Amino acid sequence: MKNALLQAAAVALFLWAPMAGAAEEQSGSLATRLDEGRKSFAEAASQQGAGNVERAATMFAEGASRYPDMRGLFCYGLAVCYAALGRPGLGCEWLEKAVDAGYWNMTAIEKDPALAKIRKMKRYQDAHERMREMVSKARAANPAVTRFGMKIGSTKAVMLLVHADGGSAEEMLEMVSGEAAGFGIACAAIEGPILVGKHIRMWGDREDTMRRISSGAQIAIREFKGKGLPLFICGHLEGGGYVLHYLLQRPHDLQGGMAINPSVDEYLLSMAEAGVAAPPAAIVEIGPQDKEIHNLRRRYFELLRKNNRMSRLLGAGSLQMALGGTFRWLLAPNAGG
């Protein structure tokens, strides 16, 4: 199993090219800046995975200066590199800087095998505890926030957007709402409670995120006067994983969902294997895919399809192609063909 850094790199690198293409017309936009940062991070992490750890450390250091919105992620990369180089003091120092810059991925900190050598050190334990406290405070202090895309003349459906960890509501609206409007779909996007850097955000625990999706969906329906219209949700990366969770946990709340290059975990697989029914779910893979991540998605899809024929696994070369095909499928009277 890849460490958390390499998994993030695989997703970021394979996702970057099509997403950057979708944002080219919006020079200087948040989506474009984040795409550039993700590509830089992915290239550095790939160097680390290939054993060029010192080169990777240099690239992570450059990224930490160049991309302030993503400084925490690059600092985490440096922590991993220095731990691998047998310099635990520097590993802890950069982990502390990552936490200070807003890198609050508890799963990565606790599970990444690359940090095994420093987990018993007091500085690691202090940083870990500080991260836990910051996540708890941020989640409690930030109510659900919903941002809205353009209003359209004849609304056929409402779609709620769920960004990735390290993404933003603004980025999701830039990516999806324009294309959706052409199909009569009005979009709103919810924000994660944890602010990282200047613009990007992360989610808290799963149940908190499920509550935010539910609240955001009702707010979007009111905003777009969409009572009685189909309600869909769409998520990106970790946000896509949350969409799949929501479809299984609360199948009567909405009519379907779309997950773009989603994360898939054992909990999702177990629910699908248990035969839990769900509304139509489109799992969309854009661009070349990491084999291990793709196989997890395919396994989930096949389990879901076995119990619910209204599911789809779509490969696409571009975001625009994926959105258009999926919107048509979701709006069809008998989705799932």
Image: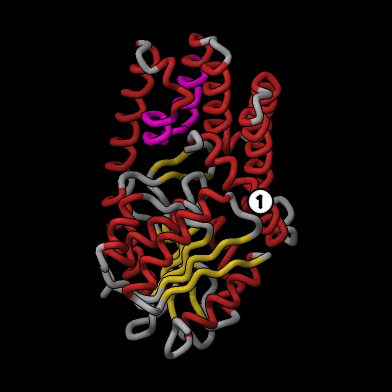
Q: How is the image coloured?
A: secondary structure
283 or 99, nearer to the observer: 283
Image location of residue 18, percent across then percent down: 68, 58
In the image, 274 versus 246, the foreground residue is 274
Secondary structure beneath disc 1? Answer: helix
Name above or below for residue 280 compared with residue 211.
Answer: below
Q: Which residue is mark 1?
A: 16
Q: Using residue 104 as the reference point, say whether residue 171 is left or right of it.
A: right
Residue 103 image point, x, y percent: 46, 33
Q: Above or below — where is 300 with respect to 311?
A: above
Please identify the quarter of the rendering in which residue 309 is found: bottom left
Question: What residue is at 37 percent from the left and 34 percent from the top?
Answer: 106
For residue 206, above or below residue 309: above
Q: Is residue 183 magenta?
A: no
Q: What residue do we see at 35% from left, 24% from top?
A: 128
Horizontal and vertical percent position of residue 33: 66, 46
Tell me the residue at 39%/72% (across/down): 305
Q: Where does residue 308 sit, x and y in percent of width and height?
A: 34, 76
Left or right, 86 with reference to 60: left
Q: Is residue 65 visible?
A: no
Q: Residue at x 58, y 38 (%)?
A: 69
Image position of 33 with respect to 54: above or below? below
- Please give the range of residues in magenta: 93-112
For the residue marked with disc 1, what is the amino acid? Trp
Residue 274 visible to an observer of this rendering: yes
